[in-house]
Image: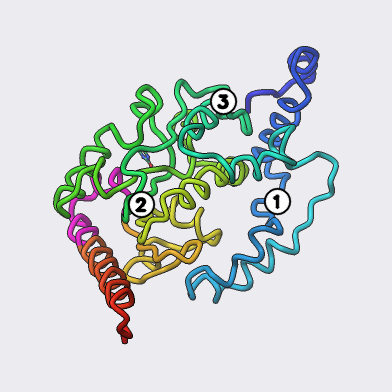
Amino acid sequence: MRWCCAAAWRKRYQTTPIAIIVTERIDILYELGLTPVWRLRARYRSEVPSIASHAANEPPFLAQQAEIEPKRTVSTEPQADTGNRVSRIATLDWAHFAADVSACTACGLSRTRNLAVPGVGDVRADWLFIGEAPGADEDARGEPFVGQAGRLLDNMLNALGMTRTKAVYIANVLKCRPPGNRAPTPLEVDACMPYLDRQIALIQPKLIVALGKSAATSLMRAEASIASLRGRVHRYKGIPMIVTYHPAYLLRTLPDKAKAWEDLCLARSTLRGILDASTLQTAGRDPT
Ligand code: URA
């Protein structure tokens, strides 16, 4: 833990703006396990039914989390302007999006990142690939999936006849690198999700591919194994979503590449079904 002695806290906080102090405290409380892990906010509660059926079948988890109301000794809001922040992000256009992400200080990652990593690709893509968070290479370049895992992702896209700049958009749940590539904390996910939601609203992809358990469970807001999530069509914000292995995992576990290919084939056939149905609808015929 970074701040373990009271003197260090005082020294830091004498010169630090209030918003940062609050974020630091939250980070520390989180590290100590003293804050609730998932506190469903009103805006997410209403979305629970639209999550894939398996997630809706997990009331114990959701109910449990919904019941945990923290003693509000500290604000769990990540940034001073949180009142406006979410609604401001929800109205960003592409011209302002990347700059807004780069200026974000909503969580502690803003102090350790080199470059924020908003996303890359075709802003009118049918396909949206979502990873967990930038790594070291991405943090240095400001672009998602540019390291070894990114090269594998590019190969996967090529196998589907696509490239990262055409018909595809690539983003992460987190826009900034967690130090040492540690897993994102729920608070970081919570703080960053408005950006991903805005990207989804702007792109309006027809299909989402969640890369790895972390991305998938962050989107679903439910704990589940990747094995239990694969092979089915889930939904995020009403958009069909396929879950597959993270390319970094595939680099370490070559035999599972075949399963990832199955997932991509499911994704491709799902998208074809959607496109065929909308073509029939446009032509005035019932897709059924
Ligand atoms: N892993 C991710 O999840 N995202 C990246 O951008 C790179 C590696």
Could you tell me what secondary structure mostly forms the magenta stretch?
helix
Q: Position of residue 202 (x, y in %)?
A: 46, 48
Q: Which region is colored magenta? A: 245-261
Dividing the image into four equal quarters, which quarter contains ligand 1? top left
Residue 80: name its quadrant.
top right
Circle nearer the viewer, 3 or 1: 3
* Left or right: 7 in relation to 140: right
Residue 238 in the image: above or below residue 202: below
Q: Position of residue 200 (x, y in %)?
A: 46, 51
The residue wearing badge 3 is 103
Identified by mark 2, the residue type is Leu
Q: What SS does tag 1 mark?
A: loop
Instruction: State the residue at coordinates (24%, 60%).
Output: 264
Instruction: State the residue at coordinates (21%, 42%).
Output: 154
Q: Is residue 252 magenta?
A: yes
> Which numbered circle lies on residue 128?
2
Earlier along the polypeptide chain: callout 2 or callout 1?
1
The residue wearing badge 1 is 36
Crowding around mark 1 (Cα neighbors within 10 Å: few <14, some 14 to 19, many 20+) is some
Q: Position of residue 122 (x, y in %)?
A: 31, 43
| In contact (CB < 8 Å): disc 3 and disc 1 | no
Q: Position of residue 182 (x, y in %)?
A: 47, 36
Q: CA distance from mark 3 to mark 1?
A: 27 Å
> Which numbered circle lies on residue 115?
none
Instruction: State the residue at coordinates (51%, 27%).
Output: 99
